[in-house]
Structures are given as structure tokens and as C-alpha cells.
Image (spheres, coloured by chain):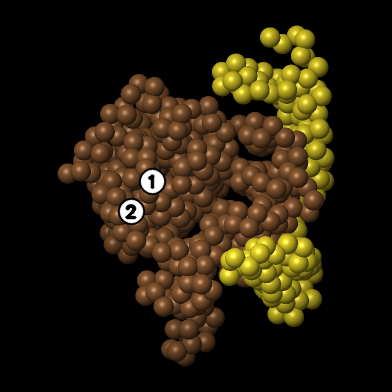
Amino acid sequence: MIPSLRGPLVAAVVVIGLGVVVLVGTTAIAQAGGYSPVGPTAIPLVVGLAILVLGLLFLGRATIRPDRDLADRMAEEDRATHWPTPTLLGAALLGYAFALAPLGYILATAAFLPLTARIMGSARPRRDVAVGVGLAVVVYFGFTEGLGVRLPAGVLDSVLP
Amino acid sequence: MDVLGDLLGGFATALQPQYLLYAAIGVTLGTLVGVLPGIGPAVTVALLLPLTYAFDPIGAFIMFAGIYYGGMYGGSTTSILLNTPGESASIVTALEGFKMAKAGRAGAALATAAIGSFVAGTVSTIAITFLAPTVAGIAVTFQPADYFALMVLAFVSVTALVGRSILRGAISLFVGLFVGLIGIDVLSGQARFTFGVPELLDGLNIVVVAVGLFAVGEAFYVASRMRHDPEVTPLKGKVGMTGEEFRRSWRPWLRGAAIGFPLGSLPAGGAEIPTFLSYNVEKRLSKHREEFGHGAIEGVAGPEAANNAAFSGVLVPLLTLGIPTSATAAVMLVAFQVYNLQPGPLLFQNSPDLVWALIASLYIGNVMLLVLNLPLIRIWVKILEIPRPVLYSGILVFATLGVYTASNSLVDVLIMYAIGVVGFFMRRFDFPVGPVILGVILGPLLEAQFRRAVSISQGDLSVFITRPFSLALLVIAAAVLVVPYLPRLIALVRGDRTPKDRLDFGDMDD
């Protein structure tokens, strides 16, 4: 098989897996009484089968009848991809989400922005911190005071108006 | 005559000072977000959706119309200066526009795009004004079976005519349909695919799905390839056109509008096909054919006008049938649902004030876009000069903000990030993202109409082929599936052995 189609192969397996999950999930839907000719399971069944069949077809295009066009594209992708960047970015996002409520919007955002900029290769930490703090403060007050939308104050609760 | 009276009433509402202000804010914010590389109108609308919750429905929709036009316009700026079309309908603009920018003619390209958008937008808005009430009047007689067939047609054309592979487009669509099934089934009250998570009973919030797939997915994708940085082409000289450039632009504007609006308003729309068509028409008609591929102004003027006209055209099926035919329209539909409004033939009867104020604000939004944008182009260009690490960090901050304020729930934010990871891999493996959004939003409507139709016919599935209208639509849908293979088939018939690509119209990420 073409090495660059390994990724699409995994994707095909994931799609097939999703098809199975949908079909299994469909059996878990309770059938309501017979007042309607088409119950709540009909469309899920069609969708599940379609995902399964399309996934199998895609598996075929990744293996026995390789999609050359996609293979070339994937080869270019593999060359251009720098995996640590999106991985670290994902970790930073998780940290950000969990820090929002306890730390408060301002502190979490002021820390998140320079951190992710650094992950994506920014070499000017001082500027990034300034942008982060500025953006966090402007958004916080713009939303809470201007639009009346609540954002978590967190540890700054006693300081903020 | 009635139409004019209604329209005047709409203007009376939309011209009130606070609504004018909302329109101005909408256009500015829309352009501001739309100009960000990789962010098309669909994400712009999804990101800014929570902002409009603070207003009354009319104010919100007036702002929305501004955001819609602004987001569209911002996309063309990015294509011209950065060669990274934020949405597929701008791909053609990038073709000639970026070449013009490289040759130091960015000012003329931006001007013809802006004025062309204005001309086409205005022509289409006039067309909407007269066409929409008529279509709504006809649509009152549509049966559930007809709606079902219309939606099937929309699905098929979006999947088959867009993207590089029907197979991958279809997978995207059905995954979207699955996501749309999550939650309580309205007709039977049964929970589906909630996997015991109470947050899923209401289904996945479309803002979460759209922002995750588009904005977060794009940020991940760009981050993974940060070493391949496209550079902003500096904007030299004046923004504006010479007399010669104007003479070469005005016919393409009008032709673009004439191609874009009818195709956009078909319930099988999207803006990609009209832009490609317009490009080819201009190339064929141009006296300067040798310039095409090296920065021909007709190649920017025509497609940009077609793009804008098609986008306006999409509002016809959205408002009169309640059927979104592009990802952006799908997000707009959500905005209606937030205010408990169901677009469709009855909208014109039940909420005429809102509909006509919205249509009037389309005119106003167009004018505002022109007035604000030509002088402000330099500011938008500055935004493109923000270093990309900071820019994408900022996009992630705003994506999180949008979802967090819409639901105030950590679970939603985490789901959005997870969907963002899916979006990243979809971009990597070249799956189109647009059909997912369409599936999520149109899927539940399709199911409801299907079940309603079959209930009315008391279980007889032939209802879809015995009604001439729905039969015709389903036949067209089948034909659309075959169209992309026509070049190959014709080549086969002619005995031409060189392999022909199937027609494709780029990814639908708008």
C-alpha cells in the first residue's frame, strides 16, 4: 500500500467504527407506540448503514484501489506537518477551559494567549503578554459591563467591580 | 404595489437611528472577523451569533444582515492579499486577485471587489424583494413530501458538486446527519444517541459544532503547518480604479450578478458554482484573455459579483422555504430558531415586520459596506499583518468566548475543542467541512418532513414519487449525482483516452 495513505486508512476505520456505534445506538432507542408509521429509529438506521457502507468504500480507496490524488496530497501534508505544535495547542486549550472558572476570565486569557502564541512559534513574549492582558481586560469589561453577559471573575472577584 | 408598501414599511423600521447603528456595527464586526485568514462567513456568523442575543429580534437580524455582508466582503480581501480564500466561493477571486496584488495592483482589485459586491448585492436585493413573496406564496401549497424532496436535492447537490471527492463529501454529510440526530426525538420523545450524558438531551448546540469545526479546526490545522507561512502582499498605491479599469469592470459586475443570483436562489445553491461559471464566462468574453492567470481585473470583478449575488440568492430558499443551502445559511437558520421564528412561507404572514425590516436592512447593509469599506481598507489590511501566532491565539480566545457565553458550560467548551480536533483531521484528509454543518441543521428538518409525509400517506412510501413535484425534484437530484462524471463519460464516448478529472468546484467551507 502507499505509505501516505496510512492516515486515511485510520480515518476509514474510524468512520466504520462510527457507523457501528450508530447502528448499536439505534437498537438502544426505545420504539414508541405504533401511532406513527415511521418511528424514531428509521432514519438513524439509514444514517448508520450509510456511514458504515461509505466508510468501507473509503477503506477501499485507501487500500485496494488507492486514491492517487489523495495520496499525493497526504504526502505533502506529512512533509509540512509539525506534530508537536497542534499537540501542545490541544493541551493548552484543555488547561484554558479548566482554568476559566477558578482563575477567572481575565487571568486565564492573559496567560493563555502568550502561551499559545509561543507554542505557534512567536518569539516576542513581552508583546504577546501585553496583547493577552489587553485583550482579556477589554473583552471582560466589554462583555460584563457593555453587553451584560456574565464572565467568571475567579480569584479577582474581590478586586473587580 | 403591495411589495413596495411593505418594503417602505421595512425601511421605516430599519432606518431608525439605533437600527442604523446596529447595521454599522454588524458590517464592521463582520468585515473584521471575515478578514481573518481561514475564517469564512459561516464562522463569522457563528462566532458573532451570541453577540446578537442582547438585542430585540429586529435589531438582531439587522445586525446579522450586516455581519453576513461584512463577512463575505472580508473574505475577498483575504483572498486578494493573502491568497488564502477563507471560503471556497473566494477561490476564484484569489486566482486573479492575488496575481494583481503581486503586480502592485491590489488597490484596484480590492476596489473592483468592493464595488462589484455592492452592485451585485443591490441587484440581488431588488430581486429578493420581488421574488421572495412570490416564492413564499407558492410554497404555502407545498406538502411535506415536496419539502423532503427539496432537502434531498440540496444535500445531493452540495455533496456532489462540491469538493474533490463525492465519497468524502458524502461521509461528511452523513456524519453531520448523525450529529443532528443526537438528543430527544421531537415526534416520539425518545432520547437518541445521548449515551447517558444529560447535556446531550437537547442535542449539540450548532454554535459549538460550527465554531469547533471551522475556527478551532482551522487554528489546529494552521498551527500544524506554521512553517509554511504565506506572506501578506503589501498594499501599494491608492485604493481605487482608473477609468480603464472601471470600463473593464462594470459589465462583469452585472453579468456576475445575473449568473449568481438565480443559481444561488435555487434550493440547490451555494456560491461556488456561480463564481466558477462567472470566471469562465469572463475569460471567454474578455478582450484581454492573455491577462487571465496573470491578474485580469475581469476575473476579480465577475466572480466577486457572482459570489455576492449568490449569497443574497441563498436567502430566498432560507426565508421562504426554511431550507438553508449553504453552511452560512444554516447558521443563519439557527439564529431564527433562537428567536423562536421558523423561516418558511408562513414567516411572511406571521412576522411581516421582521421580514421586511430584514430585507430593507440588506439594502442598507450594502450601502454601508461600500461607504465603510473603501475608506477603511487600509485598516483591514493592517489586521492581516498581525503575526499569525498571535492572530490564531486570538481566534481561539474568541471561539472559546463565543461558546462559553452562549451556554455558560464547560462541557460545551470541551465538546467544541473535541470537534475542533475532528475538524483538523478532516482538513488533513481533505474532507469538506460544509456538508457536516448542513447535515446537522437540515437533517432534523428532513426527518420531520419525511415522517410527516409518510404519516399523511398512512405508511405508503410511494408518496414521494406519486406527487409530480417531488418526483421531479428527486429525478433532478439523481441527475446531479451524474453531472460531475459527465466530462469522463463524454470523453469515453468520443474515444478520448486521456483521463479527465471529474468537475469539481472546490471545498464548500463557506
Amino acid on which the number 2 mark rests in the picture: Ala
In the rendered structure, the answer to whether residue A149 lies left or right of residue B479 reads: right
Where B193 falls versus B336 (above or below)? Answer: below
Chain in yellow, by letter, is: A
Secondary structure, mark 1, is helix
Q: Name the residue at 73% across, 23% down.
A: A152
Badge 2 local density, few (<14 within 10 Å), some, or many (20+)?
Answer: many
In the rendered structure, the answer to whether residue B145 lies left or right of residue A72 reads: left
Amino acid on which the number 1 mark rests in the picture: Leu
In the rendered structure, the answer to whether residue B141 lies left or right of residue B343 reads: left
Q: Name the residue at 80% across, 51% down.
A: B196
In the rendered structure, the answer to whether residue B147 lies left or right of residue B447 reads: left
Q: Name the residue at 31% across, 45% down.
A: B125
Residue B274, image quadrant? bottom left
For the residue pair A111 and B229, the one nearer the viewer reads as A111
Q: Name the residue at 56% across, 21% down.
A: A147
Residue B53 percent location from the top left of the image = 54, 31
Where B429 falls versus B314 (above or below)? Answer: below
Taking the image as drawn, is residue B302 in sight? Answer: no
For the residue pair B295 and A25, the one nearer the viewer reads as A25
Secondary structure, mark 2, is helix
Chain in brown, by letter, is: B
Q: Which mark is residue B347?
A: 1
Measure the C-alpha gap from mark 1 to mark 2. Answer: 9 Å
For the residue pair B343 and A54, the one nearer the viewer reads as B343
CB-based contact (under 8 Å), mark 1 and mark 2: yes
Q: Which mark is residue B136?
A: 2
For the residue pair B63 and A71, the one nearer the viewer reads as B63
Taking the image as drawn, is residue A33 in sight? Answer: yes
